[in-house]
Image (spheres, helix red, strand yellow):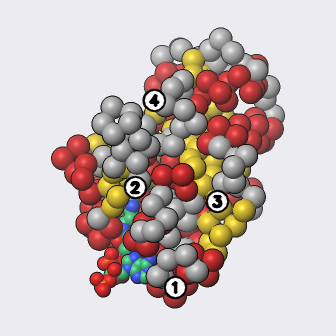
Amino acid sequence: MSGSRILGTGSALPRQIVTNADLAERVDTSDEWIVARTGIRQRHIAQSDETTASLAIAAARAALADAGVDAASIGLIVLATATPDNTFPATATKVQAALGCNGGVAFDVAAVCSGFLYALTVADSLLTTGTAKRALVIGAETFSRILDWEDRTTCVLFGDGAGAVVLEAPSAQHTGSDAPGILGSRLHADGAQHDLLYVDGGPSTTQTVGHVRMKGPEVFRHAVVNLSAVLREVIEEAGVSVDEIDWVVPHQANARILDATAKKLGIAPDKVILTVDRHANTSAASVPLALDVARKDGRIKSGDLVMLEAMGGGFTWGASLIRM
Ligand code: UT7
């Protein structure tokens, strides 16, 4: 029997688009540098009336509509974010209240850019053990609120957004190698790499929110090595060959990381979903956003074998292989 099944996907982006040329008016950078080093051309930035919760709620509603299920059937909400509306309670509880499905389980997961992979794996486990029958798994961020807008090495890289999936518990109806569902997942963390990518503030240390700090080239090197390794682990666990994978939906940090990782594994570049050009790095939102884009534009179809993967601060990283 496969793991939990994805019934629908949805996403939401802030109204305002900020181009590389717009940023070049604020910091010493250029469209040429940003495109050549990252593949990013623009990002969406939240305005004052848009928050992580409001984007998450919009993405969740879109996912419920796509799945054709009622919010009342959702017994579990797992929301991945590093930019919650409040230090507590969890942003997931705000989503729950807005959808009117109070009474089930709702909590946030903090694993930064790999947050969606962590949230998906935790939700799949809880559905498998019977905590709920149906879940919303959401990645939502307003990273623009924790950027140092004077630091050109980080502020050009990120954007805001949200993506969500409706996940249903495994069922005996869905068995066999072609059955839809999660076929395998692996998560990792290496806390020794804390200082390569972190936020320099927090409630218990500085009593401030802080700003993103990153040693980009070192993160880049670790990303390619860690992602290739975890992809191989999941491929082996699921007992499939690389050629059987129809699509890879990676965390959208940098087009060069996507290319290098695909090349290392022998995956054709045209099987890799790329949204970093339009969304930049939306941290926990990037994987479900890219998944939704590729489903809605008709590339990812029912029955396709799809690999999700991400790596971020902690370090944390992970991958999931899913039959759609
Ligand atoms: O989502 C979590 C995971 N995050 C990532 O995966 C990010 C991983 N890292 C990266 O994507 C890349 O390392 C960056 C895009 C962050 C940087 O690209 P890079 O090719 O590694 O550039 P670099 O940091 O080595 O910088 C090269 C040069 C430097 O100038 P010098 O020292 O050669 O004179 C930087 O000061 O580019 C300069 N630079 C910029 N120039 C124009 C750095 N940022 C900018 C900028 N505009 N925005």
Depth-wise, is mark 2 or mark 4 nearer the camera?
2
Q: Is 137 left, or right, of 8 in this rendering?
A: left
Answer with mark 3 or mark 4, whichever residue precedes in sequence: 3
The amino acid sitting under disc 4 is Val
Badge 4: few (under 14), some or many (20 or more) residues near its Cα, within 10 Å? some
Q: In terms of depth relative to the viewer, which is nearer, 140 or 171? A: 140
The amino acid sitting under disc 3 is Ile
Answer with mark 1 or mark 3, whichever residue precedes in sequence: 1
Q: Is 6 left, or right, of 35 in this rendering?
A: right
Instruction: Report, in whole angstroms, how far the alpha carbon at label 3 lies from the one at label 2.
Output: 16 Å
The amino acid sitting under disc 2 is Val
Q: Which mark is residue 45?
A: 3
Answer with mark 2 or mark 4, whichever residue precedes in sequence: 4
Residue 64 in the image, given as x and y percentages of width and height:
75, 35
Q: Secondary structure at mark 1?
A: loop
The reply to whether the residue tagged 1 has its Cβ within 8 angstroms of ligand 1 is yes
Depth-wise, is mark 3 or mark 4 nearer the camera?
3
Q: Which mark is residue 206?
A: none
- Is there CB contact under 8 Å for labels 2 and 1? no
The amino acid sitting under disc 1 is Ser
